[in-house]
Image (cartoon, grey):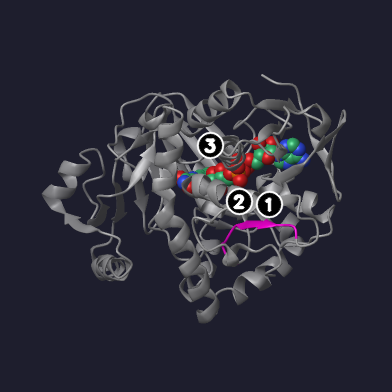
Amino acid sequence: MSSPGSAASATPGATTLAVVGAGVVGLCTALQAQRQGYQVTLIDRDRPGLSGASFGNAGYLATELIDPLSTAKTLRAAPRMWLDPNGPLALPLGYLHRILPWLARFMLAARPQNAARSRQALLQLNRAALPAWQRCLDDIGAREQLLPSGYLLVWESADKLADAQDHAEYLKQWGIRTELVRGQRLAELEPELAPQLSHALYFPDAQQVREPYQLCRQLFAAFQQRGGCFVEQPVEAIRPGERRVTVQTSAQSLEFNQAIICAGAWSRKLLKGVGIEVPLEAERGYHLTVESGPARLNRPIGSAERRFVISPLASGLRVVGMTELGGLKLKPFRRRFAALRHHSRALLPSLKGSSATVSEWMGHRPTLPDSLPVIDRHPKHPRLLFAFGNQHLGLTQAAISAELVVSLLANTEPPIEPAPFRVDRF
Ligand SMILES: Cc1cc2nc3c(=O)[nH]c(=O)nc-3n(C[C@H](O)[C@H](O)[C@H](O)COP(=O)(O)OP(=O)(O)OC[C@H]3O[C@@H](n4cnc5c(N)ncnc54)[C@H](O)[C@@H]3O)c2cc1C
């Protein structure tokens, strides 16, 4: 492993690059920049993949989620979701005054023309997402992380059959294949699901990863094997200049030719320091991981009515959900874990009374009001770039986001149209 490079100590000819944030987006970005010949230093306050959202996600590559979070439909459903004590939406009182301006922007993003713009951009990203992961994992010999699992979106109420049919028709126009399944076919696909389920949409082309944290470790191991350097220190400030970018950590000042901020939900503060305000919020999500036990699933299962997901991962059965607009500082609320227990037991009866070890976790999804990430260059300081804000889809979109930001860095042909992801769009 090489030492953290000041630009002066770099391998002759190699451009030095700092990647700030070693979640799945930063890791993919660091590897992609190495492939282009950069000498990369990855900087995180913690071990890679451990302290951000990349640790505890559901491991599902949700390429069918092409609608932005803010649509007329979600806004109509929001009050009911919020009032339900086990519901998926929470607005903690201690943060309400801080979130109001963001919520106003979120509502504006639901205007039909705004939602359509976000949908087009998400489509672009999501269509390119899986091939980008395949390229990344083939390159590092970790293709076994990708599982062609399929995905099942289930409904309990028979009177919601039309919802499933409408959703299937809607997705078909974007080329997303689904199959409506019921009865015996549903039971064959997932024998352990509660028998009272009415129907489901099966997504045969969907994929998942084996285990999100293990994936991060594999990405990091490849990065190190290729000569990448890692600095485990919090970054306090970034100062882009004409010839260098200075990264100030808690312990030292490091100089690079260029830098990319991939600090997930914490990126806002770092951007403020370089003169850019972005309406980035932390959308808190929770998980339970049932480490071993009786319940088995063949693929990730989503509940259309309860709005949560259960994924079979190498570490166990992971139950994820909740959108809690609570910022970066509040502690997790215990009742959210109870809600996830309640929902998962309803769908998977064998979890009731199980003595399996269950771990609990809360993480911060980095979310902008229009549901699109920022993947761009600083408008005034070309040596500084950004890749953050992938909301519920950061695992899905990590490899393609990395390809896009590194194409901007290296001035090569971008794999998709970058305009929707500009930092100055707000
Ligand atoms: C419950 C839950 C379930 C999810 N399920 C899925 C799913 O199934 N599929 C999917 O696609 N997405 C899912 N997501 C979303 C996904 O996990 C995130 O979008 C993604 O992990 C974001 O990755 P990231 O690298 O941008 O940020 P993070 O993983 O949060 O990483 C940011 C990193 O930056 C570091 N950092 C921040 N500030 C500093 C600083 N000042 N100095 C040094 N280091 C710093 C942090 O320590 C952290 O390591 C889920 C999220 C949650 C919460």
Badge 3 crowding class, 10 Å Cα cut-off, few under 14, some 14 to 19, many 20 or more, is: many
Circle 1/circle 3 CB separation < 8 Å = no
Is label 3's Cβ within 8 Å of ligand 1?
yes
Q: Nearer the viewer, residue 228 or 360?
A: 228
Dot 1 surroundings within 10 Å: few (below 14), some, or many (20 or more)?
many
Say which amino acid is labelled 2: Val
Marks 1 and 2: in contact by CB < 8 Å?
yes
The residue that label 1 is drawn on is 386
Q: Position of residue 235 (x, y in %)?
A: 80, 37
Q: Nearer the viewer, residue 299 or 174?
A: 174
Q: Secondary structure at mark 1?
A: strand
**Which residue, given by chain and number where applicable, does mark 2 sit on?**
405
Left or right position of 28 against 150: right
Q: For marks 3 and 2, give the CA distance.
A: 24 Å
The residue under the point 39% across, 47% down is 131
The image quarter containing residue 12 is: top right
- Badge number at residue 415: none
- Please, what secondary structure does the residue beneath circle 2 have? helix
> Is ligand 1 within 8 Å of the beta carbon of the residue shown at mark 1?
no
As for residue 56 lying within the magenta part, the answer is no
The reply to whether the C-beta atoms of the residues labelled 3 and 2 are less than 8 Å apart is no
The residue indicated by pointer 3 is: 56
Query: In front of the other: label 1 or label 3?
Result: 1
